[in-house]
Structure formats: structure tokens, C-alpha cells
Amino acid sequence: MMRSGPIFIFLLVLAVVMSGCVRRAAHFPETPAPGPALTETDARPDDFLDDLDSASLLLAVDRSLAYYNGKGRDQVFALAGRPVTAGRLKRTLEAFRDIVRSDADSETKKRRIAEDFLLLGAAGQTGTGDVVFTGYYEPLLEGSRTRSEKYRYPLYRPPSDLVMEKGPAGEIRIGRRENGRLVPYYTRREIDIAGALDGRGLELIWVSDAVELQSLHTQGSGKIRLEDGTLVTVGYAQNNGRPFRSVTLNLLDRNKIGKSDSSYRSFKVWLKSKSEEEIFEILSHNERYIFFRFLEQDPVGSLGQPVTPGRTIATDPAFFPPGALAFIRLSKPILDGDYNVTARVEFSRFVLNQDKGSAIKGPGRVDLFCGFGPAAQATAGSLKEKGELYFLLLREEAGG
């Protein structure tokens, strides 16, 4: 869900876009690590413990295979200094799927994975494998198809005057035409405070909470419960082309909030204590604005495929191949009945690289899609962990 935007986070310093989901943008250094983003490392059977069910894993694998059978089929990627075709990544997934589906016991499966696949470790931020994990989720909002005093905050569909074109260096530029020239599109301030889009019939739906609407902009997709109880899903359609700027970091730098208020959950509580005018003024620091569309299926990531809770990660496609099979190791929260974090435990699992986000930059950042609902929100909001990231590649002699 790219996501603005892909599967499992939130934020601690919010926001961003993806091509299906949006991401919250935590503020982390983006300096690329020295040397290659991936290096070959030894794999042992005991390494491949997975804390989730195989059904979700097979579903995520099938979604990446659909990508390699479709728009991703002709791509070539650089992995650990070698060119790797989408065909080889597809064969990697097919061979892995065969192992997962087999009747072999878990120890045999882990041994076969260790024997048949190369393990490529991510360099991380500094080249020592220090990968920072965050999480994103799908929020739930209360809404209506018509405006009222309760439901007065709109989600907008992409405006007709929003233009995308290639720049002189091949980059995509987003803006609007003014006297024949492409100029920047309206900022968040111009849209939310000055009403630049008022009266144009662009409202997709109306929601009741401005802060939760900001969460939807951050996550890139979510569900809205209508007055009759119907649930509709909305997702990222486009952004205004303006740069993302961290609202939380701005407030920290200006000593307007303390570190205790900078976590995702605490920041929402702090923000909800402000007046409507104050909320929009605070949020206007981030010029980026997200436009939405209705989704007929689960939220989609940057591959154009649905994201899978617990199995989809978002990374920087400049460093890691979209759709590829990966393995992660870090810690996760244990929640009580009120979704408070009571402890953290180490875990590992297989994941698929199916999303991206403009806040997820460099070889040392991963965003994990945590799913939908309060547990997903609490999990995503508490993730800011250092961990390990590996990609798997079928050995040539194993059929690659």
C-alpha cells in the first residue's frame, strides 16, 4: 500500500507515498551504506524459523508470482553485484513454494531451504547490517457519503487539473498548468486551510475526525465505516507532488512537543487535544497531500498486487528487487487486552518485498505491513526496531 503508498506501519514521525499505499515517514538517516547493498552470507537450517502460518506465506508468494508473470516479467535486477532476471526470481519463488507445500517435516524444509538458496544479507545504514524496521497498518475511520456537521472532513479524488509529465532527466514531475507552464500543485495548506479544491465536486467521502484522516494520509489506505454499518475500502490514487516534511520532527525541533509525545500513538493523543484550526495549521507543515480512490479488494502495494498482513514489506526499490523473497529477524510487541505493549519478543519470518514508500530510503530501512484493526495499529505504532534483513535467491545448480 504505498505505501503514501505497502503491508505492516505507522509512524512515529509520519507520512509518505507509495504506489498503492502511503507510508508514514519516520525520520532516519538516508546515507547509503558503503559497498553493495547485499552480500552473500552463510545460511544454517536453524536460521529459518517462521512465526506465522504457511497459508499467509503462500498467499504472499502467489501475489509476487502474479507480478513476475505480469508487469514485472522483463525486469533485471542487481543483487550482490550480479544481474538477476525476473525469471530467476520467479523460479526462486516457485521452488520455495514447492518446499513450503511439501509434506516434509519442518526440519527437512529448513534444511532444503538452506541448501537450495543463497542468502543475501542487507548492508543496513552503515554497512554492518543495521536495518531499522517500522510498521504500517490499515486504519478504520467513521464516515459518510454526504457532508454533515459530524462528517465534514473530505477525502478527495485526484483533481482533473493534476498533471504528471516527464522532466528533462526522465524524472516524473507533478503539478498543474498555469498560463501554459507546469507549476507546483496546491500545498496541504492551500487545500485544507485556503480551500483550493472547494466547490469542484472532488469529495470522495467525508469522515468525522481530522486526526484520523491524517493517519489515513500517512498509511495510504484504510477502511471507512459508513452510517449504515457498511465498510468501504479506500486507497492511494495520487499525490500533489509536493515534498514530504515531518510534522513531528518539526515540532520536536521547535520544542513544541517532548520525546514522550513523538511516538505515533502519543502524537495522535496530543494532536486531538488541539482545536480544529490548530490541527490543520500543525499538519500544514507537511506540504504533501494524498488523493484517494475506492478499492474493490484489499489494499494494493507498489507491485499492483494486494498486500498481505505480516508478510508484505516495503523497501527502497533502488536497492532491493520488487517482489523478491526475503527473511527478517527482529523483535515484536506483546499486547494486552487494551492493546498496550507489555513485552517484546524476538521473532523471524519469511516476507515478500511488495511495497515501497518515499520515506523508506536506503539499504537500511524496512516497513512491515501489520494489517487492519486495533492490534495492527498498536503493533505498527510500536515498531521502531533494529533487525536483520536477508533476501533469498535460488542457486543455479538447484534449478535457477
Image (cartoon, rainbow, N blue to C red):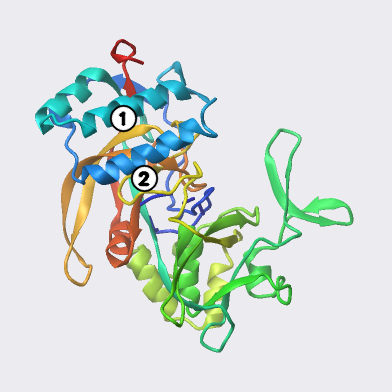
User: Residue 188 sits in which quadrant?
Assistant: bottom right
Left or right: 269 with respect to 85?
Answer: left
- Inspect this view and state whether residue 318 appears: no
Q: Residues within 10 Å of mark 1 (few under 14, many from 20)?
A: few
**Residue denoted by label 1:** 128
Q: Nearer the viewer, mark 1 or mark 2?
A: 2
Q: Residue 233's mark?
A: none
Give the residue displayed 19% in from the left and 40% down from the top: 50
Q: Nearer the viewer, residue 172 or 141?
A: 141
Is residue 91 something one can see in this rendering? yes
Furthest-top residue in view? 397
Task: Determine which residue is flagged by label 2.
Answer: 312
Residue 15 lies, in percent from the top left, at: 49, 57
Q: Crowding at label 2, few (<14), some or many (≥20) Cα neighbours within 10 Å?
A: many
State the residue at coordinates (12%, 26%).
Answer: 108
Q: Which residue is farthest bottom? A: 149
